[in-house]
Amino acid sequence: MLTPAGRECPHYYADFNRHTRDIEECRLAKANPNSEPWHAKDCAKCPVPDILLANASSSTQLILTIKASWFGFLRRVEVDAICLKNGEKVDPYVGCPDEHPGLELFRKALERGDE
């Protein structure tokens, strides 16, 4: 679904067709109890769409945290990633290291050099 910032994100949800109330939320921020409440303006600073383009691993769990500082005027959007296979914290843009055998082959080729 398109976010208010105009980018595609599967964690954003909006339903404006109901007669009783409009729903607009980030389900990734809603799942984290340590996060500040989500605002639509947070989508403009959110790196999750870029992360999902770089890493489509189903074994990587993203944790989004919105932090407010300076009396709530400045807001930061931080994303952490955990590999579900081994429970370690990983780079969100790369994901689980064991899902990328090509990276290890590339490293070995670089160490070996051109022969």
Image: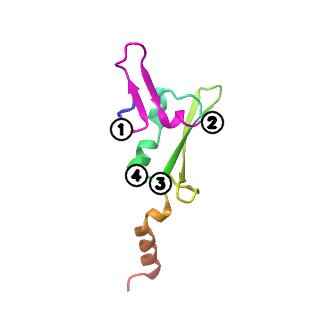
Lower position in the chain sequence, tag 3 or tag 2: 2
The residue sitting at 61% across, 26% down in the picture is 72
Q: Nearer the viewer, mark 3 or mark 4?
A: 3
- How far is the residue under mark 1 from the one under mark 4? 14 Å
- How far is the residue under mark 3 from the one under mark 1? 21 Å
Start-end of magenta stretch:
10-32
Residue 114, relative to residue 3: is it above or below? below
Mark 2 lies on a secondary structure that is loop
Q: Quadrant of the C terminus?
A: bottom left
Mark 4 lies on a secondary structure that is loop
Mark 1 lies on a secondary structure that is loop
Q: Quadrant of the N terminus?
A: top left
Q: Position of residue 109 (x, y in %)?
A: 42, 77
> Mark 1 — residue?
8
Q: Residue furthest bottom?
A: 115
Lower position in the chain sequence, tag 2 or tag 4: 2
> Mark 3 — residue?
59
Q: Nearer the viewer, mark 2 or mark 1?
A: 2
Lower position in the chain sequence, tag 2 or tag 1: 1
User: Mark 4 packing: few (<14 Cα in 10 Å), some, or many (20+)?
Assistant: few
Q: Position of residue 71 (x, y in %)?
A: 65, 25
> Mark 4 — residue?
56
Residues at discs 3 and 4 in contact (Cβ within 8 Å): no
Residues at discs 1 and 4 in contact (Cβ within 8 Å): no
The verdict on residue 12 being magenta is yes
- How far is the residue under mark 3 from the one under mark 2? 22 Å
- How far is the residue under mark 3 from the one under mark 4? 9 Å
> Mark 2 — residue?
34
The residue sitting at 45% across, 82% down in the picture is 112
Snapshot quadrant of residue 74 = top right
